[in-house]
Image (cartoon, rainbow, N blue to C red):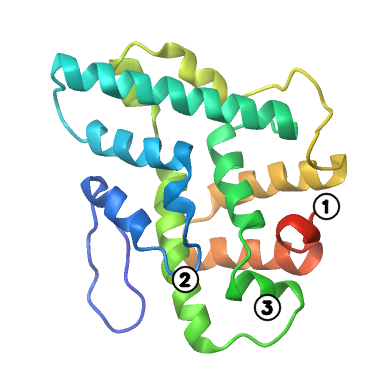
């Protein structure tokens, strides 16, 4: 898996072993690297690139995987999310993060080309996160239950966080983002959401 740099620069390949570093390189969507689920996921991705894991490393990876599952299921039960909870989780981060780009798109104001460059950089990172498939590593670790969070049915359709319309729109957006093939397509889809529904605590509630 790799990222394609924009503009005239040559293509640069950034493999999964650098995933943690890439999360730390977010420009506008800062602070997300402190999210427990995302932090565990980044470390798990790094472990997943290894052909063989020592017993101690495998135990740590298995614990992280279960922590990720716990965080995703808790979010689903609070928010009423369904489908791929990993994609819903990432989408939820994007639609709630208030920054200079998301706020400006919310009010349909002008966005400088420099801000667009920074936003596209961040969406390159999110594009790779959406593409990552945990299943091979989960199966290697014997955590077959992980498949359930990739096709999740909530115990209740009620959401303690969003009204049903917003909840359904976030789940729909998660599916749309998973189908995008470029960071630009992903950025455009999220930008349309900001314009239609707003962003963050006050925009979505």
Q: Disc 3 marks which residue?
A: 104
The residue sitting at 83% across, 52% down in the picture is 205
- 55 sits to left or right of 42: left
Cα distance, mark 3 to mark 2?
15 Å
Query: Between marks 1 and 3, how big is the CA–CA gap?
Result: 18 Å
Residue that mark 2 sits on:
120
Q: Residues within 10 Å of mark 2 (few under 14, many from 20)?
A: many
Report x, y in % for residue 105: 69, 75
Residue lying at 43% horizontally and 20% vertically, measured from the top left = 66
Q: Earlier in the sequence, mark 3 or mark 2?
A: 3
Q: Which mark is residue 205?
A: 1
- Identify the mark nearer the N-term, 1 or 3: 3
Image mark for residue 153:
none
Name above or below for residue 56 compared with residue 110: above
Q: Secondary structure at mark 3?
A: helix
Label 1 crowd (10 A; few <14 / some 14-19 / many >=20): few
Q: Position of residue 16 (x, y in %)?
A: 26, 46
Side of 110 where 149 appears, left or right: left
Left or right, 76 with respect to 124, comes to right
SS for callout 1: loop
| Quarter location, residue 85 | top right
The part of the image, by quadrant, that contains residue 79 is: top right
Badge 2 element: helix
Q: Can residue 114 be seen here?
A: yes
Within 10 Å of disc 3 (Cα), the crowding (few <14, some 14-19, many 20+) is many
Classify 22 as above or below 156.
below
As measured in the structure, the alpha-carbon distance from the residue carrying label 1 to the one carrying label 2 is 27 Å
Q: Earlier in the sequence, mark 1 or mark 2?
A: 2
In the image, residue 116 above or below residue 156: below
- Judge from the rendering whether residue 27 lies leftward or rightward of residue 193; answer left or right: left
């Amino acid at each position: 898996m790799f990222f394609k740099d924009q503009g005239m620069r040559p293509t640069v390949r950034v493999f999964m072993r650098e995933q943690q570093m890439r999360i730390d390189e977010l420009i506008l969507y800062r602070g997300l690297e402190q999210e427990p689920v995302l932090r565990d996921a980044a470390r798990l991705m790094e472990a997943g690139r290894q052909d063989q894991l020592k017993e101690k490393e495998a135990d740590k990876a298995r614990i992280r995987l279960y922590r990720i599952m716990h965080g995703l299921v808790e979010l689903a039960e609070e928010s009423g999310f369904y489908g791929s909870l990993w994609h819903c989780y990432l989408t939820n981060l994007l639609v709630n993060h208030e920054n200079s780009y998301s706020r400006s798109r919310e009010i349909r104001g002008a966005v400088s080309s420099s801000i667009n460059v920074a936003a596209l950089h961040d969406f390159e990172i999110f594009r790779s996160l959406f593409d990552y498939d945990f299943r091979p590593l989960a199966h290697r670790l014997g955590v077959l239950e992980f498949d359930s969070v990739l096709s999740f049915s909530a115990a209740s359709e009620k959401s303690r966080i969003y009204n049903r319309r917003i909840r359904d729109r976030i789940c729909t957006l998660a599916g749309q983002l998973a189908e995008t093939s470029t960071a630009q397509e992903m950025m455009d889809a999220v930008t349309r959401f900001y314009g239609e529904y707003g962003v963050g605590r006050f925009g979505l509630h």
